[in-house]
Image: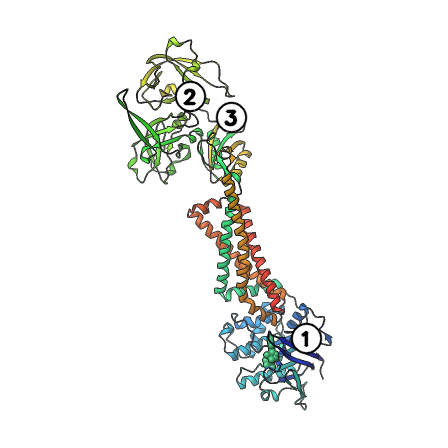
């Protein structure tokens, strides 16, 4: 007799259902040896499958002991049972236990890969056994597409391909026609000569001529256990030409049974990757379901994180005060040279080249001057009749303070659709649909809130010399015009003395005048508003008083005799219209600071840092103008951040709950893989890999989608994406990957519970 492989001692097994306890096996004592071909019979429900499951290491028992190769199994842990199933048992399942969405070939291959076989060998061995069971040509069919008989043959081929020393088969011929059934039994008979084959059968007659032993079970007890066909030579010679009992080794040689070693080199990641890939590609519908779900989570988390990044800076909680910079703009920096010297053309070029800098305007002050255009309904005239003077009085009502001057520094020829860049005086460019406005004029009012007194304004007719390509409300003025209007009192004090007789009077009592160019004046001609009542026409004294580098008033005056005209249609009272010639004599172009506009407030620190390294001083106009906290904004900010955090937490719950349930569709497959001997560790790896890949795809889709929306100009997306720097994307990716990892871990815990139940 052969070596004892399996010995059962007093094995009992009960199933506990809610309402009843079924004792499936009662104190079974059986010994199985190498070379045996055992047929187990008995009516349905007698415990045959239970016995086979225990022998196959698929199920546990309540009492007694099972010895494998004379070793008791009481100390076996999960891993030992895994190894037992993997290396010692080839199992033909009553219900086939195939992975339906895998191809026929992949089903067989699975068993071999689980044993650590490499893919190439697995494929060769599989092909051999497929041929053996007559499934040649069906390699690429899905297992679900097979008939019951074909499924049974596939299940048999998978068990045989493992080339294990013990084969257990639960009604392997139940669904086969009698001819095929008999072939299979003959095959098992051949195999049993070097193995132990235990087969449950319904149809003992079919097997009677082949088996060496017959066991009959009734109600969980062995009632018959007899050797049969004893006269025959059980250890008979094998037919040389039949490869059925042999397996093909990696190098193509035929090898006898007994791959019962753990010596094969396992490449766990490669194997896990094979199964993860199969899962993804054989069920594209399910794979897309996973990806769609993960993409929804990723998009939601992208938006929530973006909003968090946006609200990270507490500038959002501060009140803007227009005392320092009249224009409220969060992308404007004011830049000076650290050494205090004037900015040059070269500096402007360097500034424009800084990353995230959009435009540079050398006329910084003008960027805080409002302009108003009648066509844009920026102002309206108010008329009143003055009974005293018996004339109609016209006053201006400005309607909005949203438009601020910019010089043509900010544009180039390329921005123009028609015409040319403004060069001198009142020339401007603006946007229009066509060139019909070229050469026309526009009446425009200006208000330099930080420089002039309240109520003072300047008006000018602007000549349109160019039309911009891109639609914008912004009008671009000449540098000269911008500099003129932003002529700050810092540049000097302009006063005229109206009467020689007033020589002794304090000049400081005279109004400070803002010099503006009037092209119709020449030489020392000047013009003041007729509303300055004390002003007289004729030759009067003009005084100019400048400032030194520290901003201190220089004591000396420059005095000059000017010819004063009075103007009845002046802008407002404190301007002094002068000839260009006169203007240039006293005007000193101070280019100490420039306005630099950046792509987004998010880049403020980055750009300021870069400027500092280049030797410039920069300040953010919104920051210096925002000092005080607004209680309501502080509250709003906290609310938004709390909502974002809450949302991110809710996403964790949603993902863990929903994705984990989605993953249950894999449960059945994992049962099969467990039965054919896959380690729990490997199963865990497969789920991590599969979901990991879906997650990466979802992340790529999300980022692509967001960039698409950003480029399409969706403002809320574009705004938050400025805050997505390397750190932002890293947080986004890490958040989503760990979310998936947590979910897979939760699923794996569930899986372990189910698989070991
Ligand atoms: P057989 O294979 O001989 O038809 P089984 O071994 O499948 O019989 O079942 C033996 C007994 O145990 C039956 O009464 C069956 O109802 C019961 N049984 C089998 N599996 C379970 C289970 N998972 N839960 C509860 N009862 C079970
Ligand atoms: Mg059964």
Q: Position of residue 581 (x, y in %)?
A: 37, 19
In this picture, residue 254 sits left or right of residue 364: right
**Upstream in the sequence, badge 1 or badge 2?**
1
Per the image, the residue denoted by label 3 is: 341
Q: Position of residue 472 (x, y in %)?
A: 37, 39
Measured Cα–Cα span from mark 1 to mark 3: 93 Å
In this rendering, is residue 501 above or below 205? above
Q: Is residue 278 visible?
A: no
- Callout in the foreground (1, 2): 1
Q: Residue furthest bottom?
A: 231
- At horizontal 67% and vertical 88% (from top left) the residue drawn is 226
Look at mark 2 in the image and give the residue it sits on: 587
Mark 2 surroundings: few (<14), some (14-19) or many (≥20) residues within 10 A: some
Describe the element under mark 2 as helix, strand or loop: loop
Q: Quadrant of the N terminus?
A: bottom right
Res 327 quadrant in image:
top left
Ligand 1 neighbours mark 2 (CB distance < 8 Å)? no
**Residue tagged by mark 1?**
62
Judge: label 3 CB < 8 Å from ligand 1.
no
Camera-side residue: 143 or 71? 71
Q: Earlier in the sequence, mark 2 or mark 3?
A: 3
- The number of numbered badges drawn on the structure is 3
Q: Nearer the viewer, residue 504 or 439?
A: 504
Compute the Cα span from label 1 to label 2: 105 Å
């Amino acid at each position: 007799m052969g070596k004892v492989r399996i010995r059962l001692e007093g094995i009992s097994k009960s199933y506990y259902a809610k309402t009843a306890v079924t004792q499936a096996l009662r104190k079974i004592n059986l010994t199985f040896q190498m070379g045996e071909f055992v047929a187990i019979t008995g009516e349905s429900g007698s415990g045959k499958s239970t016995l086979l499951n225990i022998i196959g290491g698929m199920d546990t028992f309540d009492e007694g002991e099972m010895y494998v190769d004379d070793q008791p199994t009481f100390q076996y842990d999960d891993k030992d049972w895994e190894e037992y199933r993997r290396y010692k048992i080839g199992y033909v399942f009553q219900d086939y236990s195939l992975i339906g969405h895998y191809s026929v070939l992949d089903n067989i291959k699975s068993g071999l890969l689980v044993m650590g076989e490499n893919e190439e060998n697995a494929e060769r061995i599989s092909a051999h056994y497929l041929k053996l069971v007559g499934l040649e040509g069906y390699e690429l069919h899905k297992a679900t597409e097979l008939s019951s008989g074909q499924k049974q043959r596939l299940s048999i081929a998978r068990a045989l391909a493992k080339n294990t020393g013990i084969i257990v088969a639960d009604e392997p011929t139940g669904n086969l026609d009698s001819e095929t059934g008999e072939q299979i039994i003959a095959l098992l008979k051949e195999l049993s000569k070097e193995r132990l084959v235990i087969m449950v059968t319904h149809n003992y007659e079919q097997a009677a001529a082949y088996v060496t032993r017959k066991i009959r079970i009734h109600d969980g007890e062995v009632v018959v256990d007899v050797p049969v066909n004893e006269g025959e030579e059980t250890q008979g010679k094998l037919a040389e030409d039949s490869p059925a009992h042999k397996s093909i080794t990696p190098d193509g040689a035929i090898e006898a049974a007994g791959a019962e070693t753990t010596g094969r080199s396992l490449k766990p990641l490669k194997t896990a990757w094979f199964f993860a890939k199969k899962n993804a590609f054989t069920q594209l519908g399910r794979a897309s379901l996973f990806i769609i779900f993960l993409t929804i989570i990723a998009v939601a988390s992208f938006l929530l994180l973006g909003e968090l990044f946006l609200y990270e800076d507490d500038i959002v909680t501060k009140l803007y005060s227009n005392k320092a910079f009249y224009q409220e703009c969060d992308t404007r920096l004011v830049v000076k040279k650290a050494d205090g010297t004037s900015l040059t053309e070269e500096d402007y070029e360097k500034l424009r080249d800084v990353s995230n800098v959009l435009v540079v305007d050398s006329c910084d002050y003008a960027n805080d001057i409002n302009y108003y255009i009648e066509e844009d309904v920026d102002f309206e005239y108010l008329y009143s009749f003055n009974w005293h003077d018996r004339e109609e009085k016209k006053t201006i009502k400005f309607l909005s303070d949203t438009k601020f001057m910019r010089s043509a520094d900010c544009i180039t020829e390329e921005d123009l659709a028609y015409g040319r860049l403004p060069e001198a005086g009142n020339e401007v460019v603006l946007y229009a649909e066509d060139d019909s406005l070229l050469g026309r004029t526009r009446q425009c009012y200006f208000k330099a809130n930080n420089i002039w007194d309240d109520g003072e304004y300047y008006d000018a007719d602007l000549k349109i010399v160019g039309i911009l390509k891109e639609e914008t409300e912004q009008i671009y003025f000449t540098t000269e015009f911008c500099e003129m209007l932003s002529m700050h009192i810092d540049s000097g004090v302009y006063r005229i003395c109206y009467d020689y007789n007033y020589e002794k009077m304090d000049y400081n009592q005279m109004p400070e005048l803002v010099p503006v160019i009037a092209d119709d004046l020449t030489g020392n001609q000047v013009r003041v508003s007729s509303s300055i009542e004390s002003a007289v026409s004729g030759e009067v004294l003009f005084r100019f008083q400048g400032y030194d580098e520290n901003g201190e008033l220089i004591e000396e005056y420059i005095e000059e005799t000017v010819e004063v005209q009075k103007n009845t249609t002046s802008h407002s009272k404190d301007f002094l219209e002068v000839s260009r010639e006169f203007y240039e004599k006293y005007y000193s172009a101070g280019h100490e600071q420039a306005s630099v506009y950046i792509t987004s407030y998010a880049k403020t620190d980055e750009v300021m840092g870069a400027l500092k390294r280049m030797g410039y001083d920069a300040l953010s106009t919104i920051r210096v103008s925002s000092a005080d906290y607004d209680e309501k904004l502080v509250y709003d900010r906290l609310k938004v951040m709390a909502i974002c955090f809450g949302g991110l937490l809710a996403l964790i719950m949603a993902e863990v709950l929903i994705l984990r349930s989605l993953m249950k569709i894999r449960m059945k497959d994992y049962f099969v893989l467990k039965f054919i001997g896959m380690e729990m560790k490997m199963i865990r790896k497969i789920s991590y890999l599969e979901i990991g890949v879906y997650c990466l795809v979802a992340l790529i889709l999300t980022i692509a989608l967001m960039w698409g929306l950003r480029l399409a100009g969706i403002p809320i997306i574009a705004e938050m994406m400025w805050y997505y720097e390397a750190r932002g994307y890293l947080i986004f990716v890490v958040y989503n990957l760990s979310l998936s990892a947590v979910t897979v871990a939760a699923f794996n815990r569930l899986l372990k519970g189910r698989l070991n139940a």
